[in-house]
Image (cartoon, rainbow, N blue to C red):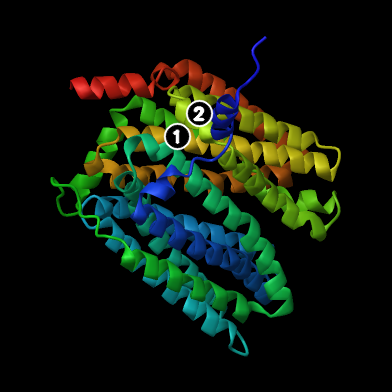
Amino acid sequence: MAFPTPANWREWLSLAAVDVTPLQRHRDFRLNYIGRFVSFFGTQITFVAVPYQVYVLTHSTWMVGLLGVVELAALLGFALLGGALADARDRRLIVLIAEAGLMAGSLILLGNSLLPHPILWLVFVIVSIQGALDATQTPSLSALLPRLVDRNEIPAALALNGMRSTISMIAGPALAGVIIAVAGLPVAYGIDVATFFVGLACLVLMKAVPPPIDAERPSMRRIVEGLRYAGSRPELMGTYLVDVIAMFFGMPIALFPAIASGLGGPKVLGLLYAAIAAGSFLFSATSGWTKRVTRHGLALLVAATLWGFAIIAFGFAPSLWVALLCLVAGGAADMMSGIFRQTLWNQTIPDSLRGRLASIEQLSYSGGPLLGNFRAGLLGSIFSVRFSVVSGGVFVVIGCLVAALALPSLRNYDASTWQAASVKA
């Protein structure tokens, strides 16, 4: 029997750890990474502060839920426009302008929170404007990545971005609760404003990212062109469909307050929110092996199916710790799905179309959870919380199996075959 040598161990450890090569090799990727890390951390604090303020002002959970409707409307109204802009203008500049606008919105929220009687409608207006800015900015951010790293480094860069986001999603909300309780809403909003300065400084230091050579001014024709291209790629459409299935049927976050009431009350609510992000972080931190995978479509289907099983188990969880472990497993499956989905997109979509396709991607991964939370809450109120969670997970598993059978182009997609065909073409 052959025992592993030190060289073997180093190789195995490299496959079980996050690959930091993109951070080591590319200055602009480092700057973008640092800027987004700090800025997104502040955004997560405001993510908690805004609904808390609305609830304090209205004592209405319905009004808090209305925030999601406002965000969804902004997403639907501006995502496709953001994609067209990303393919026609300097992507770094678009992100920079939108980031400045988002900071201005947080400044207004800060000023409003300092008033003796904060204005409720102003909060909703700012949430709508920031939603529109985020919808405009996100396609440029997504389309920026392949211009910052080499093609074979995209899976590693996506895993690093996943780690960055999940750390913020764990620490930001947890710190937000402490800040609001100890120092108040103005301090929470103030910290968010301060983090924007770091994000803006990093963007200013980055080099310009000019539009593709064949770029044209944004127009409805260009938007339709992007939609037609997506429709011509069944494996791409399959990734959107699988993501929507997983998020629409399997998103349980709207039920967390009700679930927490049976597992220990408000003190455990934050743990439920953090568990999914913790699972995503753990997968990102051990994702070095993902660069060896070329069957990205099959890996996506497996990951989405695992998410469904994790949600089913969560619905039957008899205790808090079992529930948290199920959500951690679900978060890991969700990050696995995201890495392989985005790798397929970024390695195969032409640079001249990346912004517009990123906007379609944004509609699927942002719209799905918003509608999924509405579905979960509705079924939970009509039937029961357990029925809503378990039935959703069952539909995810069934939906993924049907998608695997109905979409052979997604199931059989192989990055090495695609790249060889592209070189011949």
Give the spatial CA distance, label 1 vs label 2: 6 Å
Q: Is residue 99 visible?
A: no
First of labels 1, 2 by sequence position: 2
Q: Is residue 17 above or below residue 57?
A: above
Residue sitting at 86 percent across and 53 percent down?
264
Q: Quadrant of the N terminus?
A: top right
- State the image coordinates of residue 187 (x, y, percent, origin top left): 61, 79
Query: What residue appears at the point 29 percent right and 24 percent down from the top-left corner?
Result: 419
Q: Are marks 1 and 2 in contact (CB under 8 Å)?
A: yes
Task: Give the image location of residue 193, x and y in percent.
Answer: 50, 75
Q: Which mark is residue 341?
A: 1
Query: Relative to residue 26, is residue 17 depicted above or below?
Result: above
Q: Is residue 177 left or right of residue 110?
A: right
Q: Dot 2, crowdedness within 10 Å: few (<14), some or many (≥20)?
A: many
Q: Amino acid at mark 2?
A: Leu
Classify mark 1: residues with Cα within 10 Å, few (<14), some (14-19) or many (20+): many
What residue is pinned by disc 2? 300
**Image coords of residue 335 (percent x, y):** 55, 39
Q: Residue furthest front?
A: 6
Quick check: 81 left or right of 74?
left
